[in-house]
Amino acid sequence: MRKRLYAIWSLLLVLVISIAVLVPGCGGERCTIEVKATLCGEAWEGDVDYTLTPASGSAVDGTEVPDSFTVDCGTWTCDNVTSPPGTYLVDITPDPTQTVSDGGNITFTLNFEEEQDAWIEFLTWTINGIPIEEWEGYWNYEEGLGYYAEVTCWDIIDIHYTQGVDGCEGYEVTLNETDELVIHYVVPEEGDPIGLYVLNDWCAVNKTVEPEGPDGVKLGQVPSFNGKPVEEEDELILPYCVNQTLDVETSWELVKCLNYTKTVRWFHIWECGEPPCCVLFNFMVPAPGFAFQLWPYACVELVDDVDVNPENNCIEGPPLYLQIVGL
């Protein structure tokens, strides 16, 4: 009896083994998905939520990287990524949707960067490159509201700003920038119109990094008068007691996490000598005694990128009351 039972059990065991070898499992062939991440181009690990979704069937939720999942072979999509605090998702490589077969494996790499913040701050008015506080013809005409300066023929009026883009150190970023100068012609009363002559020297707007670092790379420069683009050698008119706006739009490539000093050389009083004078405009004042009030504005804007703090993208500088005392 025992021999017969042993024979039956042996036969059943052989049948079970044969079925296991010949018939695939209920779930079909299995494949592997790996999920990794980078931050600022370097491998990164930590908590991050994401979803792996098959073409058909149930999705798989992930909560950390790196991680590995055994799944049904087929087409899978990685999405619904929640970026870690202080970062944003740039892309998923090599592709957010991939196909895996024959027991193989695929990898989704989540590429994060630190949040970007473009900013700009007013630094100082300058005359011939000299900070206005050090200019001989300067004094503060109203505390906290602006400055007064006396200038003569050949002097150049310019402004310095400090700016930068926070984010992944060393990465390049593209910005569009707008600088405005509102001019109000106030003295003499009912004075004759003043001429403005467009020079638009390329060197009139520049950026430097001190003590070390790559200077900003300018990609374009377009000046305007009251919102309308102007070209080199255009002649403009500045009437008495009417606000007029000069502006220049520039585009730049900058390196993140560097502090740039931006210089805008707005105009040269009277005719420039040997070109280039590195100014945007010639200010054709006919005689001493003329006075003007100037208000500066500046804005920066990331190109095709998210700025986490747009509130510091624009700045209004203190006004300057400018008196022409000699030609």
Image (cartoon, rainbow, N blue to C red):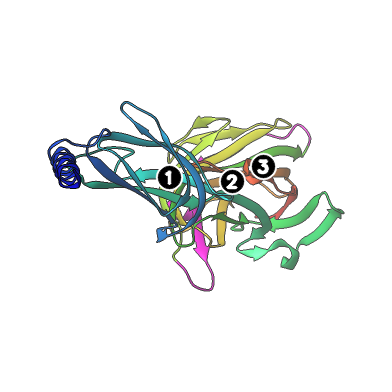
Residue 100 in picture, x, y percent from top left: 23, 40
Q: Which label's residue is closer to the chain start, 1 or 2?
A: 1
- Residue extent of the magenta highlight: 189-213
Mark 2: secondary structure = strand
The reply to whether the magenta stretch includes residue 209 is yes
The kind of residue on which mark 2 rests is Phe
Q: CA distance from mark 1 to mark 2?
A: 47 Å
- Compare residues 109 and 310 and report the one nearer the observer: 109
| Residue 286 seen from this side | no
The kind of residue on which mark 3 rests is Glu
As drawn, which residue projects farthest toward the top? 56
Residue 221 in picture, x, y percent from top left: 44, 44
The reply to whether the magenta stretch includes residue 44 is no
- Compare residues 142 and 136 and report the one nearer the observer: 142
Which residue is labeled 3 in the image?
A: 311
Residue 303 in picture, x, y percent from top left: 46, 41
